[in-house]
Amino acid sequence: MSKLLFQGHGSYRITTDDNIVIYVDPFIGEGYDVPADIILVTHEHPDHNKVEIVKKKEDTVIIRNDTLRLGNIYNSTSIKGVGIEAVEAYNKNHSRYQCVGFVLRFSGLTIYASGDTSTTNDMKNKLPGYEIDYALLPIDGRYNMDIHEAEDCAKIINAKKVIPVHMKPMELFDEEMAESFAAPNKLVVRAGEEIDL
C-alpha cells in the first residue's frame, strides 16, 4: 500500500506500492533517511528546496520548477512508473514563472502537490477533471491563500481527500488552523504522521 509521511510545513514523503520514494519540497521535520528515487521542488524558496538533507540513490532524479515548465508551457514525464505533470502555481508572493505544482500518478492514485499558491486557472479548468484522490493545499494566509480561499479551491478541485499544509510559516503544524479548515473531505495529517493512501 502507498504511504504519505507529512514531515511538516510543506514537506512530505510518498512511498508508492512499488517502493518508489518521492520527496516533495524537502525542508523541515524528520524522515529524510529513506533514499529518494525522486525529489520534487515546486520553487526555490529556502523553505521548499533543501535537497541536500535527503538521502539519495545513485540514480535519484531531482525535478525543479523549471524542469517541466518552459514559460507558459507545462509538461509531463514518467520516472520509475510515476507520472509527473507540472501545473500552475502562483500568487502575489510566487511568480508563475518560478513556481509549479505537481500532479502525481502512481499505483492507481492521483495526488495533487500544489506547492505555494493561491487559486489558479488550472484549478478551475483542468484539475476537476483529474479525479484527484489527495490534494495538499497551503492555508497560511500570509504567503499563500488563506483558509477560506483554500476551502473554495478544495470544492473546485473536488479531491476525495484534502490535506491542509503550510499553516504557519516555518512551523511544522498548527492544530488550531488545521481544525478550522472546513473543506469538504478534509483529512488532517499531523507533522510526523504517516498515512496509508
Image (spheres, rainbow, N blue to C red):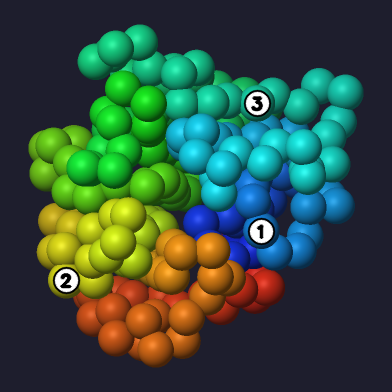
Residue annotated with mark 3: 62
Label 2 crowding class (10 Å Cα cut-off): few <14, some 14-19, many 20+? some
Residue annotated with mark 2: 148
Alpha-carbon distance for marks 3 and 2? 33 Å
| Viewer-nearest of discs 2 and 1 | 1
Alpha-carbon distance for marks 2 and 1? 26 Å
Sequence-earlier tag: 2 or 1: 1
Find residue 28 and name its label: 1
- Badge 3 marks a residue whose secondary structure is strand
Q: Amino acid type of disc 2?
A: His
Residue drawn at point x = 37 percent, y = 26 percent: 98
Cβ–Cβ under 8 Å for marks 2 and 1: no
Where the N terminus falls, by quadrant? bottom right
- Badge 2 marks a residue whose secondary structure is helix
Q: Up-down: is 68 above or below 165?
A: above
Residue drawn at point x = 50 percent, y = 17 percent: 67
Q: Amino acid type of disc 3?
A: Ile
Residue drawn at point x = 64 percent, y = 47 percent: 26
Q: Position of residue 45 (x, y in %)?
A: 50, 39
